[in-house]
Image (tube, rainbow, N blue to C red):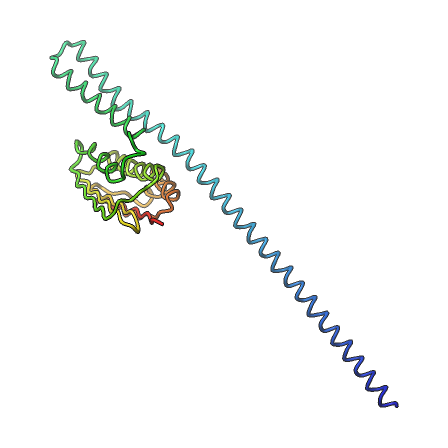
Amino acid sequence: MQNHEQNEHTVLIWLILGLLLVLIISIAFILLLKLNHRKHLETQHQIQTLNQQHHKKLQLSSIEIQEKERQRIGSDLHDSVINSLTILYLQSQLKQEEPTIVDHIQDAISLTRRISHDLNPPLLEYATLDHIIKDFFQQWNAFYTVHLRINKQVAVELSTEQKTHILRIAQELMNNIHKYAHASEIEVHLRLSQQAVVFALRDNGRGFSDLEKKTGLGMQNIQLRTTLLQASYKYKPQPHSGTLFLLLIPLK
């Protein structure tokens, strides 16, 4: 009888110990779940904060780039069109020969047309990218020897927004070359395939330093538009040996 009671007492103790062990494991499991959940929430908060900071940075860059673009337009109007009109006025006062005045009028018209075309390219919505690129670089034939090569494997359909971003990148590159590179030749290669659009631009100018590449607003403009295109680019400036720019736009 005494042995039976001892066995029951032992079983009861083991049962209590077992329940305590299950309780401890359950509590530990619950605490672990709460800890993981808290870490998950903290990670999500950090990701959200980083996304907000990145979005804010893009907005600030966009505003800064817009202001820079307004300055560039004002500078183009002042340095090109207004100067040409001033020369015309002086020539008219000096009563120079009519052919000379006509030439300057045509130059002023061409300059105004180029600035207008850069601001609002005609029929951008309906034109294909290869025609847009060809038309844009034809305007620079008066300033550089332009070698244009287009490899169109398939008919690629791009949105108006995508074509606008690509054109603005090309414009920014040419503005930088025209103002700073002192180049004489331009090589352009556009490749259109089912997988991607590849745009390459090379000049034989003086090149740019790493500091100019990182801090210039023109490069910020290119970085912003590349991000919006979900694309990637490589920019390889080497002092005294020209520059090479590569833009890769994957097509889904």
Residue at the spot x=32%, y=24% of the render? Answer: 74
Residue at the spot x=85%, y=90% of the render? Answer: 3
Q: Position of residue 117 (x, y in %)?
A: 27, 28
Q: Is residue 168 visible?
A: yes
In the picture provided, is 49 more to the left or to the right than 187?
A: right
Residue at the spot x=72%, y=73% of the render? Answer: 21
In the picture provided, is 23 more to the left or to the right than 138?
A: right
Looking at the picture, does residue 53 appear above or below residue 110?
below
Query: Quadrant location of the N terminus?
Result: bottom right
Looking at the picture, does residue 110 appear above or below residue 64?
above
Quarter of the image where one finds residue 229: top left
Q: Nearer the viewer, residue 190 or 241?
A: 190
Q: Position of residue 138 (x, y in %)?
A: 19, 34
Residue at the spot x=67%, y=63% of the render? Answer: 30
In the picture provided, is 246 more to the left or to the right than 68?
A: left
Q: Nearer the viewer, residue 39 or 236?
A: 39
Quarter of the image where one finds residue 16: bottom right
Q: Position of residue 153 (x, y in %)?
A: 23, 48
